[in-house]
Image (spheres, rainbow, N blue to C red):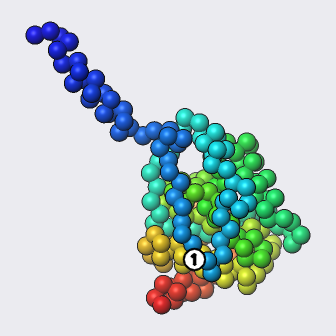
Amino acid sequence: MSRFHHFPFVAFFLLLTASCAKKPLEESSEILHLNYPKELGVVQRDKWGWSKTRLVEQAGDRTLPDHSINKITIHHGGEDFPADKDPVKYLQTFQAWCRVEKKWIDIPYHFMIDLKGTMYETRPINLPGDTNTGYDVQGHALICVMGNYENQIVSQQQLISLINLTAFLARRFSVSVDSIKGHKDYTETLCPGKDLYRYLLDGTIVNAVREKLER
């Protein structure tokens, strides 16, 4: 029998194997779009200038790990955020810095909340986040409150928005309230800042989310 007799089968097998392999982001990754209730008031990415094209360009030939949400983790920006600072311009500048300077594919957090409590959709939820510290962000939905809460004070509007967004994500991804934590619960850091973290320590955030989920 000719040694080339099985070539069509081998070629088919190699083609099938290649088609099942993980593909680069531009070929394989579908951005998961969440259906937010209108009353939640999330500003979606297309409303502040986010671009999938830039995400694809930054990713290049890299592939990303699988990512299923099972935790919700709260961060702060870690830099003082003055009241007159434009949050949309900040997001655009921050996104460019993350991609150019940090070489990340996008803003490291999935959501950001400004001083007035406005919630912004940032990194796609199905793409794992990034961190400057040593913890594995796979499975984490990352929410960042703009500002430095070692120095600044969390407003009532921010706290309400944080609770509402966390409850939405917990319901959407079936996340246990026991898995709602702060960045510092996973690694050595001051994040999310003492004034924000105290609402995790005293149960304010978790109890409010639990109450919403039980309704």
Please name the residue shown 54% across and 61% down the image. Answer: 33
The residue under label 1 is 37
x and y percentages locating residue 89 in the rendered image: 81, 58
Would residue 27 be seen by someone viewing this image from the given angle? yes
Residue 184 falls left or right of residue 15: right
| In front of the other: 153 or 171 | 171
Looking at this view, name the residue that lies furthest to the left: 1
Tell me residue 145's x, y (percent).
Answer: 70, 69
The residue positioned 51% from the left and 58% from the top of the image is 32
Q: Quadrant of the N terminus?
A: top left
Residue type at the position of mark 1: Pro
Q: Is residue 95 left or right of residue 39?
A: right
Depth order, front residue of 108/26: 26
- Is any part of residue 183 visible from this angle? no
Relative image position of residue 104 (x, y in whole percent):
64, 46
Within 10 Å of disc 1 (Cα), the crowding (few <14, some 14-19, many 20+) is few
Q: Residue at x 72, y 52 (%)?
A: 95
Give above or below for 58 relative to 127: above
Q: Nearer the viewer, residue 130 or 194?
A: 130
Q: Quadrant of residue 133?
A: bottom right
